[in-house]
Each structure stands twice: as structure tokens, then as C-alpha cells.
């Protein structure tokens, strides 16, 4: 038989006081003397009283729940971001409600509507699709993760990694290794962040005096934002850039880059001796693939931590300032100096 839960009335009967006195004592109200508060709180603990979170939220102005929308829960990057959010939310007494939108505006709207029904205290959107509609979450504190736009404001706050600067650093690394025909493998399904990274790629080429060749820039048309789709895109599209003379690839993210590494193996190309490959994100698989992937490290867990702290500050009425974090180049085994002789022989094979 299930054990009956202890109620405020049970504690009141045991303490010989009114229901309202117990309620105030458990809220640590100063209307009740310290001695009575301690006695009732001790009695509640001894009796195994567990507060009803739903009832508390109905009585107060907060549910201590935060709605989180992410592009996908299977991407290691977003998994790290959410872990960072939770590490800040849990000690502060908040829980997370999670919805994956799969870059679908309809699912995003439905997710926000569901969060509003659940009376969340605030929202965090970690999406690579771009900014939400201006009226997506009226009257709810909102923090965006990895959205960079002049439209941010009027109740929207953000923490982001500088995609454009990160892409520029990645391509500058390849240029410093002597590569002059550098291809870009993008992801059209993440329009906003993909455009920033493509612009960073073009910035680096222009600063070095190289003309941007549209033929060396290919974007996956897949609408799916899942890691498997990214891997397939990298594996399927890399050969086109090699056939056009690319000696190095800068990829939108690590999973596309890992797909490109697989394409190199399919084509009997040695990495990095024949071609170099750079990713973006520094997710765990980039450290375990063969060869280990050179990539731009996004402080994904820190993004989540900062986003949650911004939201908590908003809820407490503290000053909030948007944050932009810099990614860091992590050089591993997939990049090296260009070898003209090897690249010449490689171009005859395709």
C-alpha cells in the first residue's frame, strides 16, 4: 500500500497550531517567532513532509521552471550547452523543460505555447535557425544562445560565440600552412550561423589577397539538422571540392568535417598529407576520429552557463549585458603544410 503523503493539516494537528501558522513557518515568515518556526520545521522534517511544487507555484508568482528550445537533442554541441544550463539552474532551485525544434518554425511556436501553458518563469532559445519572431514569447524573459543580430533587444538578450571571427581564424590557419585553394562546406539548414561562418571564410581570403571562388563554396541542401545528416553531407559533397582543386576544407561544423574525412578515405586521399580539414565546435567525436580533427573550439558548456545566469539575473531584476565569446583554434592531426607534389598527383586521380 502506498504511503499517504504528509499534509500541512497533519503537521498543524501534531504541532497544535493552525494550518496558516504551519504554512508561514515553512516559508520562514518573520510573522512567526524563531522558536516556533524551528519547532514546526523540525516536526515537518521528522514527519517526512514534502512540499507540493505545483501548489507553491499557484500560490506564488514563480514555478521555478525554465523552458529551453534547442535545435536537436542528439547534437553533442547542444547537449553540452544544456549541461551548462543545468549546472547553474539546479543550485539556484530551477528545473529545465526541454523541446527540440529541428529548425522548424512551427515546432518552435508550439514549444513556446506549451511552455506558456506550463507557466515557465523564462525562456532560453538555443537555435541555429536565427532569431525567433518578435512576439514569440511576450512578457517572458528571453535569452538567446548563439544568435547575433542587430534585432536583438527590446526584451531579448543573448550570449553567443563570434562565428565570423572563428571562421576567419580557421581559414587563416590554413592560409598560414600555405593552402591557397580552400573550400567551404556549409549547412544551409542553419541559415544564420552558416552565413556568419561563410563570411568569416571570405574575410580571411580577402585579407590575404585571394579572390573568393564561388565554385569552392558548397552548402548542404539537407533540411535535417541531425548529426547523421551532417556526416552524410560532408561525405557526399567533399569530393566535389577536391575535384575543383581544393587542397583544404573548412567545414561548418565537426560532423560535416568528419564526413569529409570519411570521403577522403573513400577516395584514398591521405589527411593531412594530401588534403587538410578543419571543423567548428570541438565536440567530443572530433577528438576520437582518425586523424584527430583540427577545429574551432566553442565553449559550449560555458554558453549554457552564461545563458542561464543571464536569465536568472533578469528574473531577479539585476543588470544584464549581452555576451560574445571568442572561439579558440585547436590544432590536431588533420591539418599540415600544403604539399604541392602530393596535391598535383591527387588532382590526377579525380
Image (cartoon, rainbow, N blue to C red):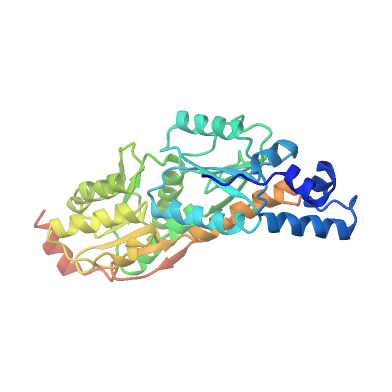
Closest to the observer, 198 or 160: 160
Instruction: Say whether residue 154 is left or right of residue 145.
Output: right
Q: Is residue 248 left or right of residue 19?
A: left
Where 158 sits versus 36, above or below? above
Labels in figure, total:
0
Residue 230 is situated, as x and y percent measured from the top left of the image, at 30, 47
Task: Please name the residue shown 9% across and 57% down the image.
Answer: 348
**How far from the left and from the top, in percent, is residue 46?**
69, 58
In terms of image quadrants, where is residue 58?
A: top right
Above or below, 143 against 278 in this view is above
Residue 237 shows in this picture: yes
- Between 185 and 299, the residue placed more toward the observer is 299
Q: Kindly identify the residue that appears in the image at 37 percent across and 48 percent down.
A: 74
Left or right relative to 79: residue 59: right
Please state which of residues 130 and 318 is positioned toward the viewer in this rendering.
318
Q: Quarter of the image holding residue 266?
A: bottom left
The residue sitting at 41% across, 47% down in the picture is 73
Judge from the rendering whether residue 277 lies leftward or rightward of residue 39; answer left or right: left
x and y percentages locating residue 194 in the rendered image: 41, 45
Q: Is residue 183 visible?
A: no
Residue 120 position in % (x across, y down):
62, 39
Amino acid at each position: 500500500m502506498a504511503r499517504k503523503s504528509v499534509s500541512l493539516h497533519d503537521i498543524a494537528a501534531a504541532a497544535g497550531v493552525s494550518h496558516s501558522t504551519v504554512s508561514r513557518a515553512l516559508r520562514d515568515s518573520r510573522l512567526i517567532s524563531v522558536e516556533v518556526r524551528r519547532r514546526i520545521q523540525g516536526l515537518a522534517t521528522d514527519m517526512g513532509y514534502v512540499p507540493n511544487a505545483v501548489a507553491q507555484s499557484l500560490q506564488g508568482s514563480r514555478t521555478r521552471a525554465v523552458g529551453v528550445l534547442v535545435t536537436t537533442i542528439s547534437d553533442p554541441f547542444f547537449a553540452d550547452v544544456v549541461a551548462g544550463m543545468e549546472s547553474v539552474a539546479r543550485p539556484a532551485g530551477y528545473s529545465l523543460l526541454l523541446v527540440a525544434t529541428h529548425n522548424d518554425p512551427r515546432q518552435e511556436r508550439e514549444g513556446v505555447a506549451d511552455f506558456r501553458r506550463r507557466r515557465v518563469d523564462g525562456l532560453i532559445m538555443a537555435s541555429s535557425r536565427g532569431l525567433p519572431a518578435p512576439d514569440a514569447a511576450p512578457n517572458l524573459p528571453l535569452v538567446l544562445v548563439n544568435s547575433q543580430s542587430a534585432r536583438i533587444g527590446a526584451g531579448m538578450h543573448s550570449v553567443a560565440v563570434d562565428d565570423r571571427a572563428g571562421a576567419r581564424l580557421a581559414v587563416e590557419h590554413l592560409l598560414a600552412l600555405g593552402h591557397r585553394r580552400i573550400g567551404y562546406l556549409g549547412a544551409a539548414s542553419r541559415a544564420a550561423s552558416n552565413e556568419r561562418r561563410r563570411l568569416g571564410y571570405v574575410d580571411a581570403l580577402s585579407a590575404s589577397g585571394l579572390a573568393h571562388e564561388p565554385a569552392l563554396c558548397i552548402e548542404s541542401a539537407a533540411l535535417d539538422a541531425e548529426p547523421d545528416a551532417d556526416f552524410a553531407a560532408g561525405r557526399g559533397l567533399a569530393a566535389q571540392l577536391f575535384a575543383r582543386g581544393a587542397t583544404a576544407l573548412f567545414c561548418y561544423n565537426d560532423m560535416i568535417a568528419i564526413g569529409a574525412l570519411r570521403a577522403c578515405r573513400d577516395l584514398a586521399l591521405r589527411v593531412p598529407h594530401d588534403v587538410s580539414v578543419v571543423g567548428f565546435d570541438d565536440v567530443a567525436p572530433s577528438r576520437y576520429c582518425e586523424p584527430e580533427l583540427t577545429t574551432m573550439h566553442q565553449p559550449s558548456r560555458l554558453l549554457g552557463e552564461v545563458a542561464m545566469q543571464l536569465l536568472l539575473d533578469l528574473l531577479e531584476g539585476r543588470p544584464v549585458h549581452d555576451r560574445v565569446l571568442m572561439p579558440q583554434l585547436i590544432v590536431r592531426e588533420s591539418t599540415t603544410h600544403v604539399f604541392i607534389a602530393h596535391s598535383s598527383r591527387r588532382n590526377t586521380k579525380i
